[in-house]
Amino acid sequence: MTRLPRTPVTAASRARIIEWLGSPEIRAKFLADGLKFSLLLLDQYEAGVDRILAERAELGELSWLGGPALGPLDWPRNQGGEPLAHIATILLTEAQALLESRDFVERDWPEPGARLPATGYLEVFHHLGTYGNPEDDGTGGWLVRHVPSDGVTFAPLVEGPDDLDLPHEVCQPVLLGTGFSVPRAIDMVHADKAAFEAAERVDEETDAAWTAWRRGVEKVGPPVFPASRLYGHSEAGTAYAVDVLQQVRPLKDESDSYVLLLSIESWTHFDGWFGDAGSFEVWMRASDLESQRFEDAWCMIRTD
C-alpha cells in the first residue's frame, strides 16, 4: 500500500513551503503566488463533551465541532422557526497565539490581512437545509458570532433543543495547528495540463499530510481527506463562492476582499451533515472582519 505523503510537507515558514512547492517531486512553485497561512483543526482528542469538561477542570479550554454551544443562549432558529445546528466553537486565544508564534521570523508570514479577534470565541450555527444560495439572504439560515470572554470564567455549555434534528450527533474537540493553503486543482481547470497536474499533486500531498497530522503519525494510507481549517482557500473551489458573494455581499471598495473564515470537511465527523460529501464554508468581506460585523458573514454548504 502506498504511504502518503510522499514528500516532506512543511508549514514551518513561507520560504520552506515555497521551496517544497518548487521541489522536483512537486513542480508547483507557481502556486506560491496564492500561498496563505491557515490554522488546521486537528481532531487528536477523543470525541465527546467529557474531554471538554476535563480540560476545564484543569483550567484549560478547547475548540470543538458540533456538541454544545456557549451560554447563556436563546438557541438560534431560522425565520421558519427551525433550530440551527451548532457547527463549531473556536477558541480565539489559541488561534492568536499561533498567529503570533515566535517560531515565525519572516515579516510576511503569516501574511498581513484581516483576522479574527484575539480573544473570546468564534461560534457558528447553520440550518442544514440552507445551502447559502442568493435567495437564502435574510432567512436566518445561519448565525456567526463572536463570544467575548474574560479569560477567567468559563461560559456554560448549552445543549441543542429537543426539536433539533441532526443526521447524527457530533461532539469533537480539536486542537489548532499551523498549516498553509494554496489554490486547489479545481481552481486550475482552465490552466494547461502540466499546471493542473501539479496542483493535483499538491492537493494529494497536503491532504495526506493533514490527515497524518490529525492522527499523530508521519504517513498514512489512502484515502486521505482535506482538513477543516480557519483561513485559506476553498476546498470546493473559489469561483462559485465568489459569484454568490458578489451578488449578496459586494465588496465595499477596491481594497476590500473576500476571506474564507472557516472551512469544515464532511468526510469524517460530519459525514452526511452537508449533503453528499459536501463542505461547509463561512465567508466574510475583509472590511466586515476588520470591523467585527459577524452578522454580515455568509455561510455555504458546498455541493456544487
Image (spheres, rainbow, N blue to C red):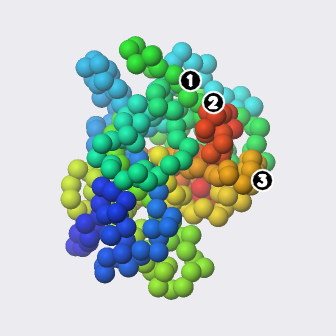
Position of residue 215 measured from the top left corner of the image (x, y, whole percent): 26, 51
At horizontal 50% and vertical 49% (from top left) the residue drawn is: 112
Residue 143, quarter of picture: top right
Q: Is residue 116 above or below residue 302?
A: above
Q: Residues within 10 Å of mark 2 (few under 14, many from 20)?
A: many
Q: CA distance from mark 3 to mark 1?
A: 33 Å
Number of disc labels: 3
| Quadrant location, the C terminus | bottom right
Between 36 and 235, the residue placed more toward the observer is 36
Q: Is residue 120 above or below residue 242?
A: above
Amino acid on which the number 2 mark rests in the picture: Pro
In this view of the protein, can residue 264 be seen by the observer?
A: no
> Disc 2 on helix, strand or loop?
loop
Position of residue 58 measured from the top left corner of the image (x, y, whole percent): 25, 20
> Disc 1 on helix, strand or loop?
loop
Position of residue 279 measured from the top left corner of the image (x, y, whole percent): 53, 53
Mark 1 — residue? 161
**Nearer-N-terminus badge (3/1):** 1
Between 280 and 100, the residue placed more toward the observer is 100
CB under 8 Å between callouts 2 and 1? yes
At horizontal 36% and vertical 75% (from top left) the residue drawn is: 22
**Nearer-N-terminus badge (2/1):** 2
**Nearer-N-terminus badge (2/3):** 2
Mark 2 — residue? 83
Between 67 and 261, the residue placed more toward the observer is 261
Q: CA distance from mark 2 to mark 1?
A: 7 Å
Mark 3 — residue? 247
Between 5 and 290, the residue placed more toward the observer is 290
Amino acid on which the number 1 mark rests in the picture: Pro
